[in-house]
Image: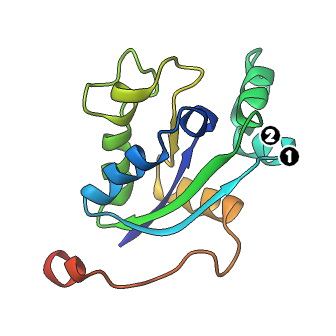
Amino acid sequence: METTLVLLKPDTIQRGLIGQIVSRFENKGLKIVGMKMMLLSDEIVSEHYDFLADKPFFPGIKAYMTSAPVVAMAISGSNVIKTVRNLTGATNPAEALPGSIRGDFALTIDANIIHASDSAETAAVELKRFFKDGEITSYEKISDKIVG
């Protein structure tokens, strides 16, 4: 069982899409084991996007990510990282397939609705960045007995 981080970005919250996007993960049978709405500080945005800090568009990313709350989610399941990345779709909405979250909801590459960890190593670091000890839960779903 893997756990990954998903961030519903400010445009998701501003456009009232939280429920529609969360339902995609739940309908797939994934388990939400942590969820909270939060305003991101400049420090956490700088840490999360440190690999882009030297890019000319970084100030725009920082302004966007601090413009409204985000919803941070810890999602668990079998092969959850790959599954979530497939549900999320390509980073550039113009390349995201219809049926994917970005394909259906994202408007631009700058405001692309969602972030999902790209590997187990990245997920481990990102989950610690957004969730404190005790904020990620563990529980058994009825479907765990069938699929697990």
- Is residue 48 or residue 136 the one in the foreground? 136
Query: What is the three-letter code of the residue carrying label 2?
Result: Ser
The residue that label 2 is drawn on is 46
Q: How far separated are the C-alphas under marks 1 and 2?
A: 5 Å
**Quadrant location of the N terminus in the rendered image:** bottom left
Q: Position of residue 6 (x, y in %)?
A: 51, 51
Query: What is the three-letter code of the residue carrying label 1?
Result: Glu
Relative to 145, does residue 17 appear above or below in the rendering? above
Residue 77 in the figure: left or right of residue 147: right
Relative to 62, does residue 84 appear above or below in the rendering? below
Q: Residue at x 34, y 53 (%)?
A: 23
Relative to 116, does residue 64 appear above or below in the rendering? above
Q: Position of residue 38 (x, y in %)?
A: 71, 54
- Is residue 121 or residue 17 the one in the foreground? 17
Q: Residue reaching furthest front?
A: 16
Tag 1–tag 2 contact (CB < 8 Å): yes
